[in-house]
Image (tube, coloured by chain):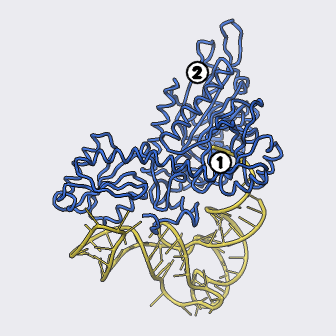
Chain colours: A blue, B yellow
RNA sequence: CGGGGAGUAGCGCAGCCUGGCAGCGCACCUGCUUUGGGAGCAGGAGGCCGGGGGUUCAAAUCCCCCCUCCCCGACCA
């Protein structure tokens, strides 16, 4: 299977391979405006699965979904100094509407802190209104200078959560719960991508946040990708938007806030973390199609038997599709499904049918097994479970093999050519971060020695910086 | 914006130097034979050669101007 000439090989040219996979697996196409993207049905099905899994986890924290407008008055952006400074260069601004020049230009949201907080100020009056926990699924626009499909597009889809709390510690712990219970859990358990959860340095922090936490993953070429972030905003926006409440003692105070997001970039991450030279490899828990029943030839009732088998699989809780396109050659169809990363293929032809069997093929290793028809459902379910675990294990081993413990900034920069470099924070220092950046290497995050995310900015136990080249 | 490339069929490219019927591969359409790892043969459709101007009997090709896209850097989920 690997080694076919369908795709540029990953080793030859990783970025080209990535583009090839997106095109051949029919995930996305470039939009007509530079930096925009058309998400094709199969790519969107993957995104919808991600949405479902993330949405469920968000709601389990007691968060409700809502929707805020695409257009934001330009003046809103200016209310928080760091925020406007961070986003101004990448804003799309609408100056005309209805054939007339607008009194005040409106910006297309690059993120919704400002508009959400305008309403938080209106909706929050007393401590009984807190915590206020909202999330929205939306599109945002950031005029990026160097777009890449899924990884950095001018318009992208995401979820953004916005919360307001009565105390700093409650806000902080909520931001950390999102990081761990929503993002990390989803990425590890569903995407089968191991992530480091850590804190961003001041340089990499979200514009307007007190603390930014991140999920960082290693892609198949050793480069890092930020997969999700959670911010503790302190009272910065509360002061800028005058979001106050009366506490139990009757004193008026500003709320403490968080915001957090994950985007369609995750689709790109999935491709780059698990794909191989034959295309995509989807973790079974995420895959929109977990199994395809492939009719080898339209003879002797194979099509009917395949449909029956597919029904049986669906009944066993497997997301299954049947491929009866016998006017397309068998080899072509096999290659198509491999490109799309469907975890398990069940092949059914006249020979199998005569024997009362089918061939169960796993995408991960190309392993083929002949299985009695009545045992197919069990074999498929077992294969799906195994592959979910195996994919995570493989990615974890890869990351481990490409992570180097370093003792100097120079060593870390060198090691970052291959993957992650770890360095004690006191060795890095502020100058070290600047030095690494000049060499094209960034500090992805700071982690505690036990691997967890450091709680806040204040110095505590000795921390470790993770450096890498990044997307 | 700095540096480097490229615009020719849906995609990938050749042709340009040395001007002379606009081509190749893949994809697409029709038919037949095929189908257990990207099938074969035959026939067919598809072009503002990025745009404008100039030179010439004649321009994809030579000259001038303009536009766009891609790659590397700064920005970034």
How far from the left and from the top, in percent, is residue A76? 69, 31
What residue is pinned by disc 2?
Answer: A132
> Residue A180 — which label?
none
For marks 2 and 1, give the CA distance: 31 Å
Which residue in the protein does label 1 denote?
A143
Residue B18 against residue A322 in the figure, above or below: below
Q: Where A123 falls versus A199 (above or below)?
A: above
Q: In which quadrant is the N terminus of chain A drawn?
A: bottom left
- Where residue A316 sits: x, y (%)? 29, 40
Q: Chain of mark 2?
A: A
Left or right: A11 in relation to A101: left
Q: Is residue A361 above or below residue A188?
A: below
Q: How many marks?
A: 2
Q: Position of residue A78 (x, y in %)?
A: 73, 33
SS class, disc 1: loop
Judge if badges 2 and 1 mark residues of a common chain. yes
Secondary structure of residue under mark 2: strand
Name the residue located 72 percent from the left edge and 43 percent from the top edge: A465
**Going by the image, does A360 lie left or right of A102?**
left
**Callout in the foreground (2, 1):** 2
For this orientation, the residue located farthest to the top is A249
Q: Quadrant of residue A70?
A: top right
Percent x, y of residue A328 = 30, 64
Q: From the viewer's perspective, is A175 left or right of A395?
A: right
Chain of the residue under label 1? A
Q: Are marks 2 and 1 in contact (CB under 8 Å)?
A: no
């Amino acid at each position: 299977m690997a080694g076919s000439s369908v795709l540029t090989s990953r080793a030859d040219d990783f970025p080209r391979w990535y583009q090839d996979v997106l095109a051949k697996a029919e995930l996305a196409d470039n939009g007509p405006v530079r930096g925009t993207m058309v998400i094709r049905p199969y790519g969107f099905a993957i995104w919808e699965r991600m949405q479902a899994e993330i949405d469920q986890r968000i709601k389990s924290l007691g968060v409700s979904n809502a929707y805020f407008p695409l257009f934001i008055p330009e003046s809103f952006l200016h209310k928080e100094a760091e925020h406007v400074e961070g986003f101004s260069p990448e804003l799309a601004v609408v100056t005309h509407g209805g054939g007339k020049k607008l009194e005040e230009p409106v910006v297309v949201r690059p993120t919704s802190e400002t508009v959400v907080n305008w309403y938080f100020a209106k909706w929050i009056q007393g401590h009984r209104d807190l915590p206020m926990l909202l999330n929205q699924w939306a599109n945002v626009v950031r005029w990026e200078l160097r777009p890449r499909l899924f990884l950095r597009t001018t318009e992208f889809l995401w979820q953004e959560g916005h919360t307001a709390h009565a105390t700093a510690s409650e806000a902080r712990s909520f931001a950390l719960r999102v990081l761990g219970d929503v993002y990390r859990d989803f990425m590890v358990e569903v995407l089968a991508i191991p992530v480091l959860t850590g804190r961003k340095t001041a340089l990499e922090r979200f514009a307007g946040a007190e603390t930014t936490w991140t999920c960082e993953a290693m892609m198949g070429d050793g480069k890092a990708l930020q997969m999700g972030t959670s911010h503790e905003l302190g009272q910065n926006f509360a002061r800028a938007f005058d979001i106050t409440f009366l506490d139990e003692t009757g004193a008026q105070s500003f709320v403490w806030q968080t915001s957090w997001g994950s985007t369609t970039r995750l689709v790109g991450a999935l491709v780059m973390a698990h794909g191989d030279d034959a295309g995509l490899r989807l973790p079974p828990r995420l895959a929109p199609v977990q199994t395809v029943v492939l009719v080898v030839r339209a003879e002797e009732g194979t099509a009917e038997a395949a449909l029956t088998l597919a029904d049986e699989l669906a009944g066993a809780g497997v997301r299954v599709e049947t491929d009866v396109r016998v006017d397309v050659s068998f080899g072509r169809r096999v290659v198509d499904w491999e490109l799309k990363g469907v975890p398990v293929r069940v092949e059914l032809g006249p020979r199998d049918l005569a024997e009362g069997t089918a061939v169960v093929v796993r995408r991960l290793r190309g392993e083929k097994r002949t299985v009695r028809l009545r045992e197919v459902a069990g074999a498929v379910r077992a294969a799906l479970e195994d592959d979910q675990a195996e994919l995570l294990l493989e990615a974890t081993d890869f990351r481990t093999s490409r992570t180097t413990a370093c003792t100097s900034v120079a060593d870390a920069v060198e090691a970052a050519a291959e993957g992650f470099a770890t360095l004690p924070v006191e060795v890095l220092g502020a100058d070290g971060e600047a030095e690494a950046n000049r060499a094209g290497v960034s500090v992805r995050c700071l982690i505690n020695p036990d691997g967890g995310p450091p709680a806040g900015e204040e110095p505590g136990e000795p921390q470790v910086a993770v450096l890498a080249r990044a997307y």
